[in-house]
Structures are given as C-alpha cells and as structure tokens.
Image (cartoon, rainbow, N blue to C red):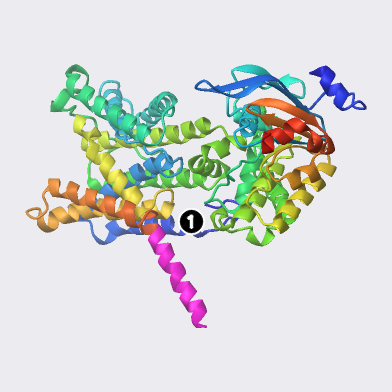
Amino acid sequence: MNISKQSLRPFILPIVLLVIMALLPLFNQSGFTLNVLINVVRWLIFALAFDLVAGHIGSVSLGQPIFYGIGAYLTAYLAGKLGLGWLGCMLVSAFFMALLALLAGLAFFRIRHVTFAIGTLGAAIVTQLVANSAEKLTGGALCTTGVPRPQLLLPFMESAIKISKPIQFYYLFLPFLILTLVVYLAVTKSRIGRAFTAVREDEVRASAVGIYPLRYKLVAFALSGALIGALGSWQAQYVTVICPSDMAQDITTSLLIMVFVGGAGRLSGVIIGGVIFSILPPFLQAVGSKYFQPAYQQILYGLILVGVMLYMPDGLDGLASRILRRFRGIRKEGV
Amino acid sequence: MEMQHQSNQPGVQQPPLLEVRGITKRFDGVVALHQVNMHVNPGERVSLIGPNGSGKTTMFNCITGFYRPEEGQVLYKGKEITYKRPDKIVLQGITRTFQNVKIFPTLTVLDNLAVSIQQHQEENLLKRVFYTGGIKKFERKAVEISESLLELVGLVQMRNERAASLVYGQRKLLEFACALAPDPDLIMLDEPAAGVNTAMVDQMKRLILDVNKQGKTFLIVEHNMGVVMDISQRIIVLDYGEKIAEGKPAEIKQDPRVQEAYFGK
C-alpha cells in the first residue's frame, strides 16, 4: 500500500479481469459457463467486501453471511410483499445492512483478534438458528420461495424486460462487480485506506497519530455490510429462494480460503483467490463428483488454509511478487 | 504547585504548557504513580528520569490518554485533558514516541509521515460540512512536509521503502520525524537515545536542540545520563512513583536523594 506514490499498477488486474469476464460469454454461452461466471462475480463481490474488514482493518469477522442472509430475507419481503423494484431492494438492503453493521460493530469491536472472530461466528450461528426457527418470518427450513425476478426498464424501452435468462442476469450483475471494485479501490488506495493500514498494524500507534481506530473499523464494517447486503438482495432475486443455509458457515470458510490463500489486504490477492476458488468447486464437481464429495471439499479447504497460513502468510499474491522479485534480482545480477 | 513553578522559573510569567496535578495511577494495587505534580513551560526541554519501574512511561501514558489515572488532573494550555481519548489529545498538539519504537511496517517511510499528518488536516475539515476538493491539496501539503522532514532526519533515500526495511536507528529517526510532522507544540520522547550507536545519539541530541530552537517544547524520558545532562534545562526525578527531586542538571547531579535512588545507599 502506498498512496503517496500513485501508479496505475493496481488497476491493471481488475481491468483485465473485467474485460475477460465481459467478453467470455460471446464465445461460450453454455449454461455451465454462465453458471461459473455468475458464481465468480458473486464470490468476488463477497470476498472483496469481506477483505475490506479482514484484510484492511485486520478484524476477521466470521459473521459476514449475516448481512447476506438478512439482505436476502429483507428483499423477499420488499420485492414480494411491497413490490419494490430490484434496484430499490438492493439499495434498501445495502442501507439497512450498513446500519446493522454500525450497531453490531459498536458491540463487537469492543473485543479483538480471536475473540472478535469467535464473537462474530457466534452471531452468525445464532442468526442462522433464528432464521431456521422463525418459521412465520422466514419459512424456516422450508425456505422463503417465490421472490420476484428483476424487471429492467430503461428509458428507451416500451415495456420492462423480465430478467430470467442466465445471460441477462450475468450482464446485469457485472456492473455490480465493477461498482464493488471501484469502491474497494477508492477506499483502500486513499487516505482512508492508509488509516485502515495504520489501524491494522498498530492501534496504539494509530491513536498516537490522531486516528480513532473505532471510527475506521466502523467505516470498513459498514461498507462491507452494505456491499454484502446488496449482494444478498441480488442473490434472492436471482435464485428466488432463500434458505437459512444461505448464511451457513461454509460461506465463511470459502471466504477465508479465497482471501487468505489469495492474499489478504491486496486487491490482486483477493481477485486471484476469488477466481480460483469460485471456479474450482464447480469444476471438481463436474470432473468427478464421485471422487469429490462436498464433505471432502471442506477437508481439502481446511488443509489448504492451514498450509497457506503456515508457509505462505501473504498468500498466492505475495508468493507471486516474491518470485518476481527474485527473478528480477537474478537477472540484475546476471548482467 | 504554582509556588513551586514560580520558584523554579522566576523570570517566566506565562502559564505552563503542560501541567500535571496530583496524578495517581495504580495497577491492581501496585502504585505506579503517587500524587505526582509536574509542569512543562513553553519552549522548555524537560527530562523525566528515574530507575526502572519508577513510573516514567506510566506518566507518559497518563498525559497522552493511554492510561486513565485514578486521581489528579492533566492540563494542557490551561485546559483539562485528563480523560480524553489519545487521538483527541494528539490533535490538540501533543505528540509522542514509544519506548519500543512504533512505526507502521507495511507503509512506506513517506506514508508513515503522511499518515501522521492527515488526521490533523482533516480534523478541521470535518467541521466544514461542504468542503470539497481539499483532500488532494491536503495530500500534496502532507507529502511536502513529509519530504522536508525526511531531509531533516536524513532518510530521503528511503522515501519509498517499506518502513519494515529500516534498521533500528532509522526507525527511531522516522518515529521522531513522525512526532514532528503535525507541527505539535509539545513533543514527548520516550528514550530517544536508547539502543542506538553514539553517532546516532549525537544526531538525536542535535535534532532535539535544533527543533527546540524553533520553539518546540520537549518532555523526554531517557536513561542515558550523558544525553539527559546535555539536553535538559530542567530534570524531574521519579522513584517508586513519587517525585523525589526537580531542578537544573547540575543540581540534580549533586542531589543525594537522586544518587541514592540510582546507586543505593
């Protein structure tokens, strides 16, 4: 992180990624490809929002699926009962999840490090249990079904298009990833991001230069909550069904894998991790679901995570830059 | 307190920059500071000395808001700051360094300085709701100040290196520069000469004297007696959490209580 030496480098990877993602469906429009692509977009948004808190503030929240689930349930109500449009649902979900994040943050940021992680994990488990039991509100384990699909009405159109095909969903979804990337970059490459780094590295020192750590933690948490809330809202309208299991712990496991294996607190790391680990599971399933039971996948993830934490603390991205540096160093010596 | 203050500095009429009144701090029954009074006048160089565990760093933490004293008051420019948050106290113009050198290792050297300035710039910004477009100007100004400070402490060539790559002495210089960065009135240094070689000790002494000439006030905790005697105008001695002596370096050298505290009977 270096904001006083502005360069174009951090923008290269996201732009390349977006171009590839925008063009890919032109070559292959199979259901499988689109499904994978939508999955990549969803996980990238989720991982970027997760990384704002875990990577930049250094508080690993294991409760982020709460914002996703509540955003989704809220949308089921807003779109289903009140007939609010898709964009309105996303905005309202984002707003309320930011608010919830602020309130939850005030409570949870009183504890730190491991206790913060355990506390937020507990909150996630309780929320899922409540969603499971509050059958009148959420439909319980039978899920809330029949969330209306989005309808797109642009100024030059006579009647709204009902978004139902995967390709339509995909291209409507992609701008949301762009927005998330813009927010992520705007925040982390600015003075706010520099203050985030200060808070992550040393809260005492941060206070000694006039930074109030809680303020920046709340900013990051609220931003993350808003993005994830909007994502939940989107997902509810895409699959039309919301279940308590949408807030399950395996989502957090995947996020941890993506962010920490990729490289926490670095955009390129999150992109690398997010893309690899959102593509890998469907491929593993397609290639050999008989060999890779979902349960084995979790064990595999666990092993990867432990290995990375032990041997590659700065993730794949850190490994890549270390190799590059060594390569350059050797070349210099060779000359 | 007032009497003492006037007797120490007969010519000075202005009120002290920093005044500590009857500070008591306990940790689980251990009294780290007991009813300590002290003050620092504007433009002065004051040292706080004493054997290990005498409460010097505890006093620093009480003044800068990291500890809440059980009794007593801290006044800065006549206003009470006793129970304020550390970040609020910094923004009023008191900066400090830490005994175990604190810097932000993954930020660059320049960003370490700039981040020490930004909050001071934005503090005023928050009061003006409709301020726009100022951040770029602020950042340019912050970089400008940072660069001049890097020149002062001789770290210009490390400008874009991560602070983690600095050696110990360089980290101390960077931390010192960070303490100067927001243009504070009172600079509190916790052992500026500890653990560095003699050349760097001399550099540090020179820096403190130079910056002091420009009107900055210093309160310094230091173990190196040579440094203390050279740079202090006044010395306050703590032992077991109580002030046992106060005076000019020459007086402190002769003081039997100080000799007893340091060397035993």
Q: Amino acid at mark 1?
A: Pro
The image shows residue A141, relative to residue B181, as above or below, that is above
Q: Of residues A79 and B36, which is closer to you in this image?
A: B36
Q: Of residues B126 and B26, which is closer to you in this image?
A: B26
Considering the whole magenta stretch, tell me its main secondary structure. Answer: helix
Q: Is the residue marked by circle 1 packed among few (<14), some (14-19), or many (20+) residues within 10 Å?
A: some
| Residue A159 placement: quadrant | top left
Residue B234 visible from this viewpoint? no
Q: In this image, B8 relative to A265: left or right?
A: right
Q: Residue A311 placed where, x, y %?
A: 33, 57
Name the residue at 71% across, 57% down: B198
Name the residue at 52% across, 33% down: A213
Label 1 residue SS: helix
Q: Of residues B58 and B145, which is closer to you in this image?
A: B58
The image shows residue A167, relative to residue B79, as above or below, that is below
| Residue A107 placement: quadrant | top left
Is A297 magenta? The answer is no
Q: Residue A326 placed where, x, y %?
A: 44, 70
Direction bottom: furthest residue:
A335
Q: Residue B133 placed where, x, y %?
A: 65, 40
Direction right: furthest residue:
B11
Q: How many numbered marks does the figure carry? A: 1
Q: In this image, A311 relative to A214: left or right?
A: left
Name the residue at 43% across, 44% down: A179
Residue A300 visible from this viewpoint? yes
User: What residue did someone put label 1 on?
Assistant: A10
Chain at numbered mark 1:
A
Direction front: furthest residue:
B265
Task: Read off the magenta span.
Answer: A318-335
Q: In this image, A236 relative to B20: left or right?
A: left
Q: Residue A30 placed where, x, y %?
A: 19, 55
